[in-house]
């Protein structure tokens, strides 16, 4: 066994020597002879401290990351939710701006034609027995909507109401193959019938009842109107003639018109709940260059007959 008395004596001597050295070093200040030894000690202990910190820091960072992970994840989820809300606000703002513009245009058309309308939004595209192309709107009997009422938007004729519930209504589009509406050529009294041909509303067929009347691409057509304004009120823009079929020997002429209303992208529409007091004629048509007509005294050149889009679609 070690002599514990001797060990205590050595420890006491070392402590006494350390106390003496500290006292001498403190009193002599910068001129202390122990300055180099103090610098060496500071370097040794500082180096050991830095090495220990470098070894321990990764474990501390890892522990901090583990303990803070739930808070960080929660913060990330909060930021993602905030970003999604801001994006939705931006989209909603753009949508409201677009709808406001469409509503103003639709009300402008109604004002020019003298139509009393109920504004509505298209909420779904749906099928209806007997019809292929129809949409659902968010206005119904509580808003004064009834079957066989005209539906239009800021561009022109959309269709007619065929079914109504308390808060919704079904509108058959002008492009539906089973749909038909009386129409009149701009600037005159030549009348005909517009029928849908499907084709997602890209074209409608116009059958002019007078085979001798001038009919060329560029002519514009408006609704002729029905008795008591049901299902169609007069004067609503329908479309522009794009091509004319040659129909020699027939009693009518056939042309295809591009509708003013984009029937594949409907949003804000108006249901005409009261017809105008008088026919607005061509007052609602947008400003455009005059339709091209044949020169006086000169026969209209025959137009090459084109395929019927309905027949082509069935092949």
Image (spheres, helix red, strand yellow):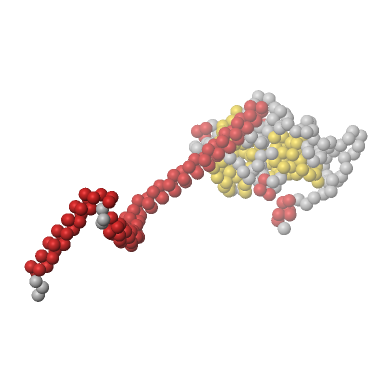
For the C terminus, which image quadrant? bottom right
Tell me which residue sits at (62%, 47%) in the image: 133
For the N terminus, which image quadrant? bottom left
Residue placed most toward the observer, 144 or 267: 267
Please give left or right for residue 305 compared with residue 171 in the image.
Answer: right
Tell me which residue sits at (37%, 51%) in the image: 72
Number of numbered discs: 0
Residue placed most toward the observer, 81 or 128: 81
Question: Picture coordinates of residue 234 (x, y %)?
Answer: 68, 31
The answer to whether residue 131 is above or below residue 237 is below
Question: Picture coordinates of residue 41 (x, y %)?
Answer: 28, 59
Please give left or right for residue 60 compared with residue 22 in the image.
Answer: right
Question: Picture coordinates of residue 261 (x, y %)?
Answer: 66, 39
Tell me which residue sits at (66%, 32%) in the image: 233
Please give left or right for residue 122 compared with residue 233 in the image.
Answer: left
User: Does residue 190 appear in the picture of this structure?
Assistant: no
User: Does residue 139 appear in the picture of this structure?
Assistant: yes
Question: Picture coordinates of residue 245 (x, y %)?
Answer: 81, 46
Report which quarter residue 293 is drawn in: top right
Tell me which residue sits at (14%, 58%) in the image: 16
The answer to whether residue 239 is above or below residue 52 is above
Report which quarter residue 250 is drawn in: top right
Residue placed most toward the observer, 88 or 48: 48
Q: Residue furthest bottom?
A: 1
The answer to whether residue 280 is above or below residue 28 is above
Q: Residue furthest top?
A: 277
Q: Residue furthest right?
A: 297
Report which quarter residue 243 is drawn in: top right
């Amino acid at each position: 066994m070690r002599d514990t008395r001797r060990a205590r004596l050595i420890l006491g001597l070392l402590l006494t020597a350390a106390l003496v050295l500290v006292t001498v070093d403190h009193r002599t200040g910068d001129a202390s002879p122990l300055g180099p030894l103090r610098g060496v000690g500071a370097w040794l202990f500082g180096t050991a401290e830095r090495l220990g910190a470098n070894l321990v820091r990764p474990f501390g960072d890892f522990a901090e990351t583990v303990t803070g992970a739930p808070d960080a994840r929660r913060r990330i989820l909060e930021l993602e939710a905030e970003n999604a809300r801001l994006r939705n606000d931006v989209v909603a703002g753009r949508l409201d701006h677009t709808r406001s513009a469409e509503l103003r245009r639709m009300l402008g058309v109604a004002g020019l034609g003298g139509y009393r309308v109920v504004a509505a939004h298209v909420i779904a595209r749906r099928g209806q027995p007997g019809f292929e192309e129809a949409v659902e709107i968010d206005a119904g009997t509580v808003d004064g909507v009834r079957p066989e009422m005209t539906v239009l938007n800021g561009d022109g004729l959309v269709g007619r109401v065929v079914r109504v519930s308390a808060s919704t209504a079904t509108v058959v589009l002008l492009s539906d193959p089973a749909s038909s509406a009386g129409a009149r050529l701009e600037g005159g009294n030549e009348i005909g019938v517009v029928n849908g041909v499907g084709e997602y509303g890209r074209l409608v067929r116009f059958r002019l009842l007078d085979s001798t009347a001038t009919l060329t691409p560029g002519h514009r057509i408006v609704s002729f109107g029905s008795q008591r304004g049901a299902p169609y009120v007069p004067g609503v823009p329908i479309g522009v003639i794009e091509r004319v079929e040659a129909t020699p020997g027939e009693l009518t002429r056939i042309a295809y018109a591009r509708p003013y209303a984009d029937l594949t992208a409907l949003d804000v529409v108006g249901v005409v709940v009261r017809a105008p007091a008088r026919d607005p004629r061509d007052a609602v048509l947008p400003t455009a260059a005059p339709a091209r007509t044949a020169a006086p005294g000169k026969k209209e050149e025959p137009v090459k007959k084109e395929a019927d889009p309905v027949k082509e679609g069935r092949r």
